[in-house]
């Protein structure tokens, strides 16, 4: 499985992380500069608001695509906790397959919408850039997210049913405590209470 997804997965992960981090950082910097320029020097940038929106948009979409790799999206696992491991595995494959179809469809139709925007030569109001540049985020980020979900489907299929179910939050806390993570918590509590507890 690593031979299939390894190198490409690393490249996609790097792109997702980089764009998410740079987008949010640049967006905050531009917004901050514009606020200071407006209130301190009475000379705000007319294009700053639009650029900030585009940067946050790219950061959000690529950050969301990265979250599929880390299983960081909200999910409800109550049903998976109640059924047998083999049934949980089947349900997870079905769930991820539906997600994959949705993400791939949005990427596919996003590409055709992008072609339409290029054909219409639509431009942004303040930055005066071709609108296909900000809209490019849709097909690319959704394609990356679909790739991550496909990666997860292959992993679930290849993993034995007993090991495929994700740990509940309580199980994660217990395993962290068993691994010695509770020592840090105890030290922090002692530090804050002056050793009173």
Image (cartoon, rainbow, N blue to C red):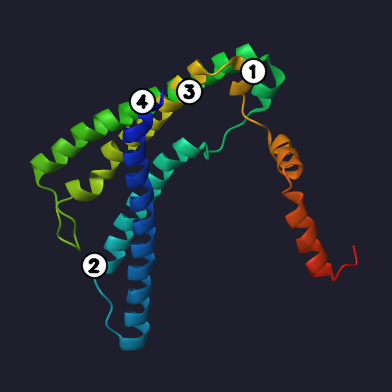
Callout in the foreground (1, 4): 4
Q: Quadrant of the N terminus?
A: top left
Q: Earlier in the sequence, mark 2 or mark 1?
A: 2
Q: Is residue 117 left or right of residue 64?
A: left
Q: Earlier in the sequence, mark 4 or mark 3?
A: 4
Q: Which residue is mark 1?
A: 162
Q: Which mark is residue 47?
A: 2
Q: Which mark is residue 135?
A: none
Residue name at image x 9 percent, y 47 percent: 121
Mark 1 residue element: helix
Mark 4 residue element: helix
Find the distance from the CA under tag 4 to the CA under tag 3.
Answer: 13 Å
Q: Which residue is mark 4?
A: 3
Q: Which residue is mark 3?
A: 155
**Crowd band around label 1 with a 10 angstrom C-alpha radius: few (<14), some (14–19), many (20+):** few
Q: Quadrant of the C terminus?
A: bottom right
Residue name at image x 85 percent, y 71 percent: 194
Find the distance from the CA under tag 2 to the CA under tag 1.
Answer: 54 Å
Callout in the foreground (3, 2): 3
Find the distance from the CA under tag 2 to the CA under tag 4.
Answer: 45 Å
Mark 2 residue element: loop
Q: Is residue 114 above or below residue 195?
A: above
In the image shown, does 33 or 153 lie closer to the viewer?
Answer: 153
Callout in the foreground (4, 3): 4
Disc 3 to disc 1: CB gap under 8 Å: no
């Amino acid at each position: 499985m690593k031979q299939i997804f390894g190198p490409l997965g690393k490249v996609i992960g790097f792109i997702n992380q980089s764009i998410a981090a740079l987008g949010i950082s640049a967006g905050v910097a531009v917004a901050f500069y514009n606020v200071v320029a407006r209130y301190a020097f009475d000379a705000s940038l007319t294009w700053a608001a639009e650029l900030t929106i585009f940067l946050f948009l790219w950061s959000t979409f690529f950050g969301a695509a990265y979250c599929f790799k880390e299983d960081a999206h909200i999910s409800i696992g109550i049903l998976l906790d109640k059924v047998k491991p083999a049934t949980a595995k089947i349900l997870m494959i079905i769930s991820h397959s539906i997600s994959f179809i949705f993400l791939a469809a949005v990427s596919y139709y996003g590409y055709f919408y992008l072609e339409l925007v290029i054909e219409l030569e639509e431009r942004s109001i303040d930055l005066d850039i071709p609108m296909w540049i900000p809209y490019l985020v849709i097909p690319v980020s959704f394609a990356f997210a679909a790739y991550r979900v496909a990666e997860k489907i292959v992993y679930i299929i290849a993993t034995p049913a007993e090991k495929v179910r994700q740990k509940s939050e309580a199980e994660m806390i217990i395993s962290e405590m068993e691994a010695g993570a509770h020592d840090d918590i105890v030290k922090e509590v002692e530090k804050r209470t002056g050793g009173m507890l």
